[in-house]
Amino acid sequence: MSALVIPPTESLSLEQPKRKRRHDPTRATTSPLATAIAILIATVWTVPTIGLLITSFRPQADITRSGWWTVISSPDFTLENYVRALSGSGSSSMLDYFVNSFVITIPSTLFPLALAALAAYGFSWLQFPGRDWLFIAVFALQVVPLQVALVPLMQMYGTLGIDGTYWTVWISHTIFGLPLAVFMMFNSIRDLPPSLVEAATIDGAGPVQIFLRIVLPLATPAIVAYGIFQFLWTWNDLLVSMVFLGGSSGVAPLTVYISQLSGSRGSAWYLLSAGAFISMVIPVAVFLIMQRYFVRGLTAGAVK
Amino acid sequence: MLAVVVALLLGAASLARGRHGDRVRAIFFVGPTVALVAVGLVWPTILTIEKSFRGLAGTGSVSVSNYVAIFTRGDLRTSIINTAVWVLLVPLLAIAIGLLYAIIVDRTPVEAIAKTLIFLPMAISMVGASVIWKFVYEYKPTQAPQIGLLNQVLKSFGFETKQFLIMSPWNNLFLIVVMIWIQAGFAMTVLSAAIKAIPDEVIEAAKIDGATGWSLFRFITLPSIRSSLIMVLTTIAIAALKVFDIVRTMTGGNFGTSVVANDFYSSSFTQNQPGLGSALAVLLFILVSPIIVYNVRQLRQVS
């Protein structure tokens, strides 16, 4: 059984009818036990979120008095929690943190994208000494835990006089994102057919034109896939922002605010539930709209 | 501003001419990335390693005291044991659940939506996921009406309600559940794609040879998705090794739930012991370094 021989290639005439049999349910598992397991997993993966979502729409007094599952017998919904979370108490409102998250995330996504696209082209299509060695070095840095870089980076930012500003997170996210960005784009840019580049060269295009007119458009799927990765990563990041920005509403993102709220007012569920969903709206929307690209990026390296 | 920088780099690169044109162009294409990771990753790593050998404050004379502390101080040892449990349990269970689910829903009419349900936790932050699960674990005395789902279940079956996040050492498992909840979708997506990439002919040939159910999985599916399995395993293991957000948000590292990355944060930024923090960061670095070596070897084989 373990020494199974795979017939190398079959003639096309044999392959056609086989494709039709793809919908033959021989591969689909339909035993009742398997179905029950799948339903159980799907339940555990969705009910916690649904519970908090329902809670976020219940009146504050109800949340602490009864479980969210009681809404079936006594439905009573309000938007009050969202209004209070967004308008905030006193000086700071969640709206500020929401804006901060955007201000942090957008440059932190675009910087590494632009730099990595340039670098990936250089590593795959330019000839220069030490190229392979440099690429392997950048690639290997992917797994370096960012913890080893945080404290020295903080001191550098202090010396530069930019500590506590958005520059610290923009630069840090760019640096931490670059190794993976270069690797993902290198994979797609290297696989472009050399004949395309040669043809363009014959037509008189220089490397810069080739990069802008041919490589960039063809690498769009990889650029989008990485862009979604980096967007989700920076939007959802807690550590980098906590270290470089602290908790003030002037600069800190939503994640820092929610994490602090969970520590200091852990039983204020009317605020926590609404706040958590406000922080999730953007990444979930991006994810659902771009799911196809995201999954492609995720599986690109893995299936090979 | 970004556009201006890129335009300047490209403009400078387009001026390069002649036999060594590529070398000059490479400076503008590759240079910024190499410079940034050198200054922002490589150099800081060297500084951190140095600091880790210079006492609690990271400025004293050279000694190994921080590394001794990691393995002898009770609280730090707890963190190391906890981290080991995270690294062991999270990848195993996330992969087991993800793989099982991928196989069951494969080619069923509800496949797309069923997968999205499991994958969605990947999109939300670990902070958000922690809040969701903290509410599941919410404690009220047994007599009181319950608002946490898990305690309601216990109560319905006639048990006393529990303070899940405080009861050490079991509270660690309740935190680990959150990470599995997040990572199973990743495992499922990658492994599902790998399963679909197995040629139909292979499956059919195996079936003709009499393989069914378990033996089909054991001898055909598993070997075929081996490289994807390794990739998922290492990715999730690294994520579990560096886990911080969940612990910080759910317990703040209290009640015996701290992990290495959380101690790193506390030592470096709240307890004013950057030397010890550096040693913990170096420990994380040492633990992932075999994976770096493995990855580079794989890359060399491919190219």
Image (cartoon, rainbow, N blue to C red):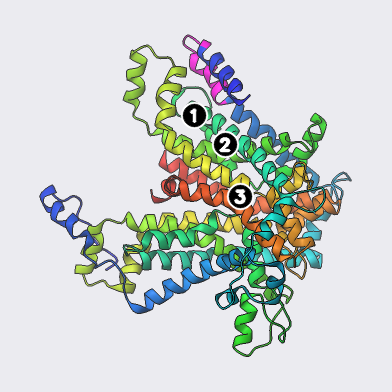
Looking at the figure, which quarter contains the N terminus of chain B?
Answer: top right
User: In the rendered view, would you say A160 is above or below A248?
Assistant: above
- The three-letter amino acid code for the residue at tag 2 is Val
Q: Chain of mark 2?
A: A
Q: Is residue B69 visible?
A: yes
The magenta stretch is B15-30
Instruction: Give the crowd class for mark 1: few <14, some 14-19, many >=20 residues within 10 Å.
Output: many
Q: Residue at x 38, y 34 (%)?
A: A191
| Circle 3 or circle 1, nearest the eye | 1
**Spot occupied by residue A78 in the image (x, y as percentages of width and height):** 64, 63
Disc with the residue nearer the chain's start (1 vs 2): 1
Quarter holding residue A274: bottom right
Query: Label 3, label 1: how many angstroms apart (C-alpha)?
Result: 24 Å
Residue bearing the label numbered 2: A138
Is the residue at mark 1 from the same chain as the one at mark 2? yes
Is the residue at mark 3 from the same chain as the one at mark 1? no
| Circle 2 or circle 3, nearest the eye | 2
Residue bearing the label numbered 1: A123
